[in-house]
Image (cartoon, rainbow, N blue to C red):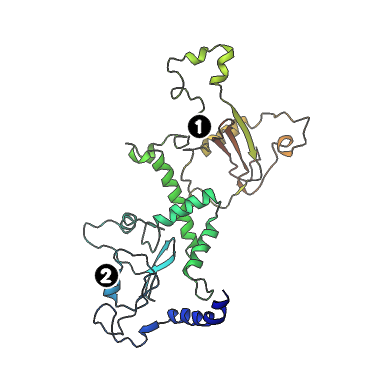
Amino acid sequence: MAQWLQNRRERYLDELLRLEGRGDHCSQTKCAGCTASASDAVFRCRDCFTEAPFCKSCVVTEHTDNPLHRVEHPRNDFCIVDSNGVHEVGLDFCSCASAEDHDIQLVRARLYPATTTNPATAATFRVLRDFHLLSLEAKCSANYFYNKLARHTNNNGVFQPRTRYNQFLTIARQWRNLQMYKRAGRGHAVDGIAGTRAGECALLCPACPQPGKNLPLDGSWRNAPPEQRFIYALFLAMDANFRMKRKDVSTEGDDPSLGNGIAFCSKVQEYMEHLDKNWGLEQEKSTCVAHDAVNEPNRETYGTAASGIGTVDCARHNTGRALRRRVPSDSRKNE
């Protein structure tokens, strides 16, 4: 370290700045890959091992198998979010008579479009998988994840890549929904996504007793002697979070539900009909604890679409079965 500090630190800094410029190619008179003039050699890749400038034809040829390398050029109008940054690239869609729509062309290239009409932004399948896993295991928010990608693109604080955060949120939400349908086997079903029944995408606990699945098919478990009934018993635990609220900031038309009742949460309309039918039932107040959520079950809440969430979990194997508590308007109360 002392040797580097005394003899090489200043030199290394000079070399880093040299690579930021054109390096040994300041006086280059032609393209590094062909005989094109220097005026055409305006493309330089930041991810390749050379800093030499190339013409358009050569840089396309060199990056046939590396389309997401960061090629510096000011006239790139398509934005792609990838694991190594936010890229502004030049992209041409196929215009043949038999060509698919632009968004389908992107999906087939493993690029998820931000919109179905005239897409100008896309995210790679790779970055969506990375975010999906990070949000699950590291609880990484979309904001932190996107800021990391922006800093990966350019971290000097001077040049800021085009903001595509809102588009990334839309893409990530659709990606999660499609992964759920895919893992539930709906892509291979004859009736497809439209035929998904209520709760069909939920993962049931494989160890808990499930009639018709892991219990004796002859029904002998129903007549088990008292000393053996615990083997077939289902142990459930109930809990609720009354602080997990969702504000009423949109409508079903502007922000439609992507999975109404297909997994752990109940269908909103059916749940609200159940509330309307049983709203007048009196709930017994606790005499041993001073818990507001128990003693004030009908407390009103305003401006929320969901006043909390209640869950029913497998108490033995920690597998969830959830029921979302929803309040559709200000007139509803915190049930």
The secondary structure type at the circle numbered 1 is loop
What residue is shown at x 43% (from left), y 50% (from top)?
A: 175
Instruction: Establish if 58 lies above or below 25.
Output: above
Q: Residue furthest left?
A: 97
Q: Position of residue 36 (x, y in %)?
A: 25, 82
State which quarter of the image contains the N terminus.
bottom right
| Residue nearest the viewer, comparing 125 with 286 | 125
Q: Position of residue 145 (x, y in %)?
A: 52, 59
- Look at label 2 and name its amino acid: Thr
Which residue carries the number 2 mark?
61
How much space separates mark 1 and mark 2, taking CA atoms? 52 Å
- Look at label 1 and name its amino acid: Cys
What residue is shown at x 45% (from left), y 18% (from top)?
A: 216
| Quadrant of res 242 | top right
Which residue carries the number 1 mark?
205
Q: Position of residue 255 (x, y in %)?
A: 49, 51
Direction from residue 33 to residue 316 in the image, left or right: right
Earlier residue among tags 1 and 2: 2
What residue is shown at x 48% (from left), y 41% (from top)?
A: 260
Disc 1 vs disc 2: Cβ atoms closer than 8 Å?
Answer: no
Q: What label does residue 258 carry, if any?
A: none
Instruction: Establish if 222 lies above or below 57.
Output: above
State which quarter of the image contains the C terminus.
top right
The secondary structure type at the circle numbered 2 is helix
Instruction: Establish if 155 lies above or below 22.
Output: above
Direction from residue 215 to residue 195 in the image, left or right: left
Mark 1, Cα crowd under 10 Å, few <14 / some 14-19 / many 20+, is some
| Quadrant of res 103 | bottom left
What residue is shown at x 34% (from left), y 37% (from top)?
A: 189
